[in-house]
Amino acid sequence: DAEITQSPRHKITETGRQVTLACHQTWNHNNMFWYRQDLGHGLRLIHYSYGVQDTNKGEVSDGYSVSRSNTEDLPLTLESAASSQTSVYFCASSEPGPGEQFFGPGTRLTVL
Amino acid sequence: GNSVTQMEGPVTLSEEAFLTINCTYTATGYPSLFWYVQYPGEGLQLLLKATKADDKGSNKGFEATYRKETTSFHLEKGSVQVSDSAVYFCALKDRSSGGYQKVTFGTGTKLQVIP
């Protein structure tokens, strides 16, 4: 069965370190998205991609970057982790059109 | 821009009670509407959807009807179970969001069902 996987599932890091969260999907979807989920804010879009070599900023992109070198993967990098980036991160994918997004299980990141 | 407003939680119900979670939306086009459910420690998963006015989405005893005249997509279930305890998100997708590309989510409503 097709799926989206995220790794690691839990990560603790220190302020100032670079961190990369992995997202891999086997749906063969063109569109991939990164969200963060925080209490009181729901889901907020960080970055998204509509295909290989395409990346776009979402509403909370400062301090984050992504790259898309193939269809299956969209890694999210925190260039210099800050305590404000402690959150649960979700990756999602979809095809263009009115259908739903499919979500990964999430990565809980703690920045100390 | 697009927006989704859903009722504040948490909602606490006794088992077998009737559930309604209100959702209203603002969109420039003719959106697709979704309800997602998030169980503790998991990602979001699609619960049901509707792609045009008057469509009714249904799954696992949950229902929601796409009401264009009231711009609403309220989630209902006739008899909730403890296993329905989760966070529920209303969401939409329409042409203005990059041509049905991005999803606009509500802030989520936490449901707790007690035995």
Image (spheres, rainbow, N blue to C red):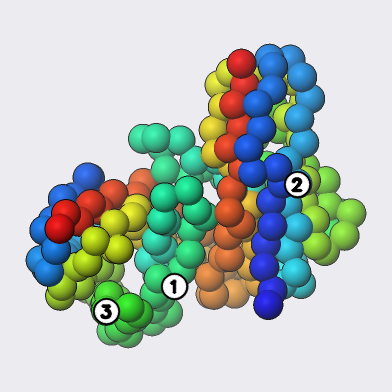
Q: Amino acid at mark 2?
A: Ala
Give the residue displayed 41% in from the left and 56% down from the top. Answer: B39
Report whether residue B5 is seen: no
**Nearest to viewer (mark 1 / mark 2):** 2
Which residue is label 3 attached to? B61
Q: Tell me which corner region of the image, top left, top right, bottom left or bottom right, holds residue A21.
A: top right
The answer to whether mark 3 and mark 1 are in CB contact below 8 A is: no
On screen, residue B31 versus residue B23, left or right, reads right
Q: Are marks 1 and 2 on the same chain?
A: no
Which residue is label 2 attached to? A22
Q: Chain of mark 3?
A: B
- Mark 2 surroundings: few (<14), some (14-19) or many (≥20) residues within 10 A: some
Give the residue displayed 39% in from the left and 35% down from the top. Answer: A39
Residue B77, percent from left and from top? 20, 72
Q: Nearer the viewer, residue B16 or A94?
A: B16
Report whether residue A112 is seen: yes
Q: Tell me which corner region of the image, top left, top right, bottom left or bottom right, holds residue B16.
A: bottom left
- Which labelled disc corresponds to residue B32? 1
